[in-house]
Image (cartoon, helix red, strand yellow):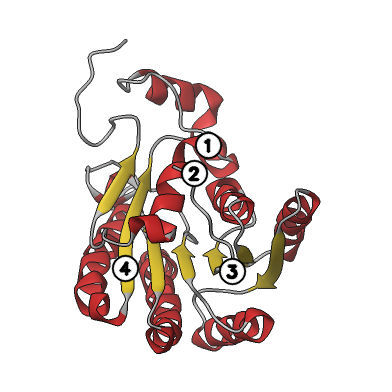
Amino acid sequence: MEVSLKDRVAIVTGGGTGLGAGYARALAAAGGAVAITGRRPEPLAQCVAEIEKAGGEALAIPCDVRSRPEVDATVQKVVDWKGKVDVLVNNAGIYPPGPFLVVEEEQWLDVMDTNINGPFRFSQTCARIMTENGYGRIINILSPSAILGFAMVSAYGTSKGALASMTRGMAAELGPNGITVNALTPGVSATEKFVELYSEFGVTLMSKGLPLGRALEDEDTNAALLLLASEAGGYITGTNLCVDGGMTSTFSANP
């Protein structure tokens, strides 16, 4: 199945590095014009340069998802750039590990403001534009911790669980407006942040315990992302597509 996003305009939050940059590249390779947001300008500029070198079209917009004025201004810049927003990928998130008994309330609230309130802000602003146009695709990036209980990441898991619930609620409300809302759950991946926290050995060890026995790569999520972002996925809404090597649905005895 060949998916085309020609004439579509997408926003990817947290798109400068890691899986977010992979999502941005995939959307652009499919023909979409992609606005990439994040807190750090340098990775955004680098990702845009990579997309443009490959013949795609992209725009870097520094933005902190914790700020409603910045979110609204970012979406307006995209509208000024291309006249609309068709696809939103809520990928921005923070992942501070720590024991539940000692996590500071300030840190807990910051995780919630970034990982659940940020998608709320972007989704609400973009959905109003999508409603006017009668078309939209919103994709919320989850985590296996939204489904399984993981030690040391209670704040992160809670925020992703809330985002899963918000996905279903938004799908129920926005469907009549021509907007689908779905979630995508990637599995263990050797991103810079994940390796920083768990080491390359830790990533390898976790991956070996999966039925497929390896970590996720950017290409593994591309087909799922493009399906949910395109007209091909027009009858899919309110669901969570797990691209996790079986992590959330199996118990593997692999060594």
How many angstroms separate mark 3 from mark 4 (CA)?
18 Å
Specify which label sits upstream in the sequence, 4 or 1: 4
Q: Secondary structure at mark 3?
A: loop
Q: Which mark is residue 219?
A: 1
Residue 182 in the figure: left or right of residue 82: left
Observer-nearest of 149 and 88:
88
Observer-nearest of 18 and 178:
178
Quarter of the image for the N terminus: give it.
Answer: top left
Quarter of the image for the C terminus: give it.
Answer: top left
Disc 3: which residue = 7
- Against 114, is 22 above or below? above
Residue type indicated by callout 1: Glu
Q: Secondary structure at mark 4?
A: strand
Q: Position of residue 182 (x, y in %)?
A: 31, 60
Disc 4: which residue = 180
Observer-nearest of 67 and 168:
168
In the picture, residue 31 is in which quadrant? Answer: bottom right
In the picture, residue 159 is in which quadrant? Answer: bottom left
Q: Which mark is residue 105?
A: none
- Against 119, is 212 above or below? above
Q: Residue at x 24, y 56 (%)?
A: 239
- Against 247, is 60 above or below? below
Q: Secondary structure at mark 1?
A: helix
How many angstroms separate mark 1 from mark 2 (CA)?
5 Å
Disc 1, disc 2: CB below 8 Å?
A: yes
Q: Residue at x 73, y 65 (%)?
A: 41
Residue type indicated by callout 3: Asp
Q: Residue furthest front?
A: 1
How many angstroms separate mark 2 from mark 3 (CA)?
19 Å
Residue type indicated by callout 2: Asn
Q: Position of residue 51 (x, y in %)?
A: 72, 53
Q: Which mark is residue 222?
A: 2
